Every structure is written in structure tokens, then in C-alpha cells.
Image (cartoon, rainbow, N blue to C red):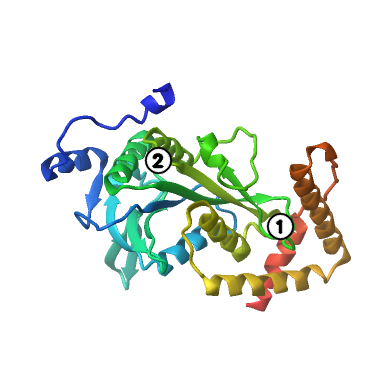
Amino acid sequence: MSDADERWTLPAGGDGQPADRAARDREHGIERDVEDPTLHEPVLVVMLDGWIDAGGSASAAMQALSQASESTPILSFDDDTYIDYRARRPTMQLRDGLNTDLRWSTIEMRAGRTAGGRDVLLLLGPEPDMAWRRFGRAVALLAVEFGVTQMVALGAYPFAAPHTRPARLSVSSPSIDVLATVDFARSSVDVPAGMAGVLEHAMHAQKIPSLGIWAQVPHYVAAMEYPAASVALLDGLDEASGISIEALGLREEAREHRIRLDRMVAEKPEHESMVRQLEELHDLAIEQESDPETGSVDLELRSGDELAAEIQEFFRDQS
């Protein structure tokens, strides 16, 4: 076992009886709503708020999956163990001076089943603020207990890409074998990790295939909703795991959003010029991936900040 895997060694001993499981739950801050959910080889899909999710694309994809699978909560994780309330203060509901309620940030796991009969587990909520290794072990314990066959994490990041091309996907995984199963872009970069990356290693240590799927969102629309990337993530999830949902509403929203963006960009020649340059960069990148001998071409692009501001104003006026 490697040093990396050693960090994710699960607690040994115990016979799996309720008393033993209850002790482990207390240690890892697991609070169950359903004691023994009926699951058959589920796929665990992860989308935790707080790390990179340009345009809210991964959140929207997760919401569509949750609705399509009719998911219901089966457990949550103790807020006091994993949440920093100074960073994520509870929301106080004040009505005519009466403090009616406090709403807390909670990480939960939900179970559902797609129309195709596939069981899914959804891990969603805020990314933990602390005790990351404990949280990783907790999720790994649950994955082993529930017979999880694969983990897929969803995310999205701003990129110099045009909205006129399908949103590209990139991949991350601790396993070369897993990388070989998908035809997504691969990057080489040192970046701060999110909890999804930590869970990739926690699952890998338990021999559960794990990967992250990342959608590229055009940098000039990254601060607003971008349903095309959400659709791309759902299609990528299907390719990687066989979890398929129609998400017809989201796909129609992506089509309408594209029409409105085209209309906005067409209003100014300089915007059209920038998009054409991004298209050239995009197409060259695709060509280079298929033919490494092509070489690289660098294009000087002006900042997308001006276009981003105008697009946001345009969409506000249209609403």
C-alpha cells in the first residue's frame, strides 16, 4: 500500500452490526435518516459548493440529476464537525422582529433511481470547512457499505473558449485505467485541491473507480448561468458511468441561451472578432490533440471583461 493510500485506511475491526456501525457513525459525524437504504451497485455523484463551479454549471447539473432520479435524503454529516459557522453563518428568519427559524448549511447524501433503473447516491451541500481527511474516510466508509461501484465528481471552470462550440470536458483521476475509459481533455497543472479531488483518492484507496469531470465555461459568461456546460456535464456523466437522464428543460434552456448570446455578440464587430479568435484557438486545440505534430499557435486576445459586463447588462435588460 502506498503512503497516499495509507492516509485513507478505514477503521479495522467490528462485525458490521448496528452497535459497531453506530460507533463509527459517531466518530465520523454521520447522522442517518434511513438505516438501511435498498441500493444495487449505485454510482456516487459528488457536487459540493464552495470550490470552482463557473456559471453554477455543476450545481444545475446536480439539481437536474436529483430531480430526475427523485432522490431523497438518507443521511447528513454533523455540521459542528465539518462546518465553520463564521464562514457559513446560519440564516436567521426574522418576521416582524420574531426570530422564527435558523437555516444551517448541511452536507447530505441522497439516494435515487433514474428512469433507466440505475441507483445513484448524490453527495451535495457545502464543501467541508475542516476535518477533510475525516470527511474523506467517512464518505469512503459509506461507499464501501453501500456497495458503490464508481464515484464521479462534477465541476466547471472559466476558460478561453467560445460559446459557439460545445462545452468541452476535462478529466481528473488517480487511476490511469480510469482515465483510459473516457475521451475527455487532460491537463497538467498544479492547483489548490477541492474536496472532490480528495474524495477521488479516498475512493481510489478502496479500489472504487473515481474521476472528476470538469466543464469549460467561456470566461466572458462565467459569472452568469451557462446551461450548455450543465448539459455537457450530464452527457459526460452518461459517457463515464452510464447514468443517463433526459433533462429536456435544461437542454431547451441551453438552446435559448445560445440564441440570446449570439444576438448579443452580433451587435458589435469587436465582440464577433473576439469570438472568432476563440473559435480558432478552440479548433486548433482539438486538432493538436488528434495530431501532436501540428504544433501550437498563440493568438493575442483582448480581455473578456468588457464583453462579460455588456452581456450581463444585456441579459438583465431581457429579463
Q: Which quadrant of the figure contains the C terminus?
A: bottom right
The answer to which of marks 1 and 2 sits earlier in the sequence is 2
Q: Position of residue 255 (x, y in %)?
A: 65, 72
Tell me: residue 190, above or below residue 25.
above
Tell me: residue 6, above or below residue 182.
above
Residue kind at label 1, given as amino acid type: Tyr
Q: Which quadrant of the figure contains the N terminus?
A: top left
Identify the residue under disc 2. Answer: 208
Q: Position of residue 198 (x, y in %)?
A: 44, 37
Secondary structure of residue under mark 2? loop
The structure residue drawn at horizontal position 33% and vertical position 54%, both measured from the top left corner, is 109
- Dot in front, 1 or 2: 2
Picture quadrant of residue 181: top right
Along the viewing direction, whichever of 251 and 147 lies nearer the viewer: 147
Q: Position of residue 223 (x, y in %)?
A: 62, 58
Identify the residue under disc 1. Answer: 220
| Number of residues whose C-alpha sits closer than 10 Å to that of mark 1, classed few (under 14), some (14–19) or many (20 or more) | many
